[in-house]
Image: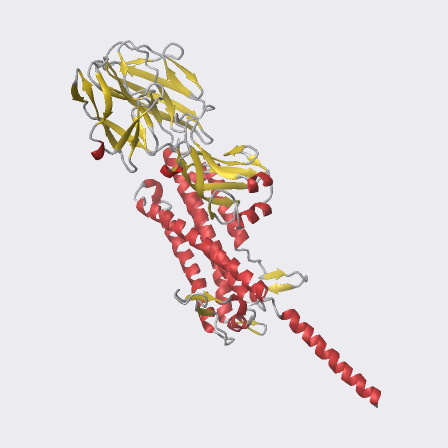
């Protein structure tokens, strides 16, 4: 009997031990819960960024809805906005009601007092570490094996969003003729469908296979028995997917309209001259270049005419004798002796990936006699660049001891310089669009003052973005993961910009493949972006955009100015 009692007691102890082990297994570590909470907040940040960009895109389409190119697609854009907003707000309200429900008698949303510094205000925070139970959501969605009405509503909204957005895309594809005639445009539109199917996948039979090899109903697979913090994060991920699909479709719509209406995009033909005016008998060495200059650019055809002063008859200019083509430029070499206003007309033709585009030329320039009065000549095209010490050559015939006149009321500062071809540098004040240069000197022992000279003030042209480690990798480069993660995001002034200054990137946005865009302070890739890069397969595009930088001349950073750097894209090797 004693042996039998001992055996029964031992069985009881073993049973309690098994129950205790099971309880430990179910008790999720609070650090894990907190980590899932951090991921949820990162997703919320991504949602905010996408939402802000979507607002801008909707506003752009609203402002242009009366234009013919937008009239076909505008009703579908409005449908997209309504469908997305309704579904997004449904999930938002559902999350709020769950956090406010307090079914477990636990305050999920808490007012936290600062015990370290009582002077600082309280903060409202979500306590993810207490969200280890599935009860609050299970009670809302399920009753044993039955899906409750609220669960059916969630499932139906998930299915409906994919169906309704697909219907919008199909309608655009059928009714907008550019998607019928342009294979590239159609491919871009169908890429949205691919993302929609992958992000809002719902099996035909409503079943999903779990890791144990068992098929579960969709809602059971997604939510049943999961800690509340995990379910909350899944809902936030769905909100992020809504905004992502919305953003991508709007981007395709705006991009394809821009291609259809502009042909050559933002490219324009314009006249570039090393100086602002020419003297009688001097070789006119101006050039016509495209708005996006490239040494590899090739003109498919050119028809250039020149109208002389006092004439209405345009004369054809011939390649070889009147101009030559070199490094993506049409460079003139015709000697002009007649003073007055000349007009360049005609067109240049380029070939892009869709069609041949003809860009008109309509430019004027003047040939004048050499002046005999006081002049102020900018060494670099009579333009002063904000933040830079621009070399200028100031001449007042017969004068000595030249200095700036009325410097206190001027919006530009002159300083003496030894730069070849210049005797002063001119630095305009930030925000100026025009600047006047006026000097005084001594002529035959008497004070003399020059006429004020007006200059345009422009910002320095945007820099060329690149990532730099063992070497510089500009846009279009294929770069190893090591050089990407250890590289410094930087920028360089354009090669043909004749000023020397330092550039340091201070902020940028990085997009790795289809992951959400991340804003990074500084000039090195860090944080979640590093994880995205490590996880991405070879060939993944990595886009650097909204690049902010500072520039400064020499070693003195105290006078640094804001400087923009162009977006660039590299691919992971």
Residue 185 on image: x %, y %: 46, 39
Residue in view at x 71 percent, y 76 percent = 17
Residue in view at x 34 percent, y 29 percent = 389
When the figure is inspected, residue 407 is found, relative to residue 418, above or below; the finding is below
Near-viewer residue (202 or 238): 238
Residue farthest front in this picture? 445
Residue 524 on image: x %, y %: 51, 43
Near-viewer residue (245 or 332): 332
Q: Is residue 218 visible?
A: no
- Which colouring convention does the figure follow? secondary structure
When the figure is inspected, residue 285 is found, relative to residue 29, above or below; the finding is above
Q: Is residue 492 visible?
A: yes
Near-viewer residue (270 or 81): 270
Residue 147 falls left or right of residue 173:
right
Residue 373 on image: x %, y %: 19, 16
Residue in view at x 50 percent, y 72 percent = 140
Residue 398 falls left or right of residue 320:
left
- Determine which quarter of the picture holds residue 87: bottom left
Residue farthest bottom in this picture? 1
Residue 260 on image: x %, y %: 39, 36
């Amino acid at each position: 009997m004693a042996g039998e009692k001992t055996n029964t007691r031992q069985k009881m102890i073993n049973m309690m031990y098994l129950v205790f082990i099971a309880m430990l297994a179910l008790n999720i570590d609070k650090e894990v819960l907190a980590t899932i909470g951090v991921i949820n907040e990162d997703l919320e940040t991504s949602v905010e960024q996408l939402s802000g960009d979507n607002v801008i895109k909707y506003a752009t389409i609203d402002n242009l809805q009366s234009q013919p190119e937008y009239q076909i697609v505008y009703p579908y854009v409005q449908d997209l906005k309504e469908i997305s907003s309704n579904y997004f707000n449904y999930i938002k309200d559902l999350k709020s009601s769950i956090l406010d429900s307090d079914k477990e008698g636990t305050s999920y949303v808490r007012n936290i007092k600062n015990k370290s510094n009582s002077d600082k205000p309280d903060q409202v925070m979500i306590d993810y570490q207490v969200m280890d139970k599935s009860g609050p959501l299970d009670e809302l969605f399920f009753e044993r094996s039955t899906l409750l009405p609220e669960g059916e509503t969630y499932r139906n909204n998930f299915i409906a969003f994919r169906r309704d957005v697909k219907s919008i895309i199909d309608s655009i594809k059928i009714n907008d003729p550019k998607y019928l005639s342009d294979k590239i445009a159609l491919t871009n539109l169908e890429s949205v469908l691919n993302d929609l199917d992958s992000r809002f996948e719902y099996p035909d039979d409503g079943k999903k296979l779990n890791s144990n090899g068992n098929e579960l109903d969709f809602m059971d697979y997604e939510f049943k028995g999961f800690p509340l913090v995990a379910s909350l994060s899944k809902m936030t991920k769905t909100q992020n997917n809504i905004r992502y699909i919305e953003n991508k479709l709007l981007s395709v719509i705006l991009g394809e309209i821009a291609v259809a209406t502009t042909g050559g995009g933002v490219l324009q033909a314009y006249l570039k001259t090393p100086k602002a005016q020419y003297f009688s008998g001097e070789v006119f060495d101006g050039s016509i270049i495209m708005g996006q200059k490239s040494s590899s650019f090739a003109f498919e055809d050119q028809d250039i005419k020149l109208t002389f002063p006092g004439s209405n008859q345009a004369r054809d200019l011939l390649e070889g004798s009147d101009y030559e083509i070199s490094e993506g430029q049409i460079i003139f070499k015709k000697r002009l002796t007649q003073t007055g206003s000349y007009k360049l007309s005609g067109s240049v033709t380029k070939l892009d990936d869709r069609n041949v585009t003809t860009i008109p030329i309509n430019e004027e320039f003047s040939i004048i006699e050499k002046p005999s009065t006081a002049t102020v000549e900018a060494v670099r095209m009579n333009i002063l660049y904000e933040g830079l010490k621009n070399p200028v050559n100031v001449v007042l015939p017969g004068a000595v001891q030249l200095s700036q006149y009325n410097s206190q009321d001027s919006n530009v500062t002159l300083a003496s310089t030894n730069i070849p071809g210049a005797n002063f540098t001119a630095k305009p004040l930030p925000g100026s669009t025009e600047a006047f240069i006026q000097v005084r000197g001594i002529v035959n022992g008497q004070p003399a003052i020059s006429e004020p000279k007006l200059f345009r003030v422009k910002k320095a042209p945007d820099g060329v973005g690149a990532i730099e480690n063992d070497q510089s990798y500009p846009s279009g480069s294929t770069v190893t993961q090591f050089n990407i993660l250890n590289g410094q995001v930087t920028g360089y002034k354009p090669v043909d910009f004749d000023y020397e200054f330092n550039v340091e990137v201070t902020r940028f946005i990085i997009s790795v493949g289809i992951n959400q865009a991340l804003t990074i302070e500084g000039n090195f890739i860090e944080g979640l972006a590093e994880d995205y890069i490590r996880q991405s397969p070879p060939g993944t595009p990595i886009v650097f955009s909204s690049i902010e930088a500072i520039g400064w001349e020499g070693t003195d950073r105290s006078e640094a100015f804001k400087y923009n750097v162009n977006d660039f894209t590299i691919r992971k090797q």
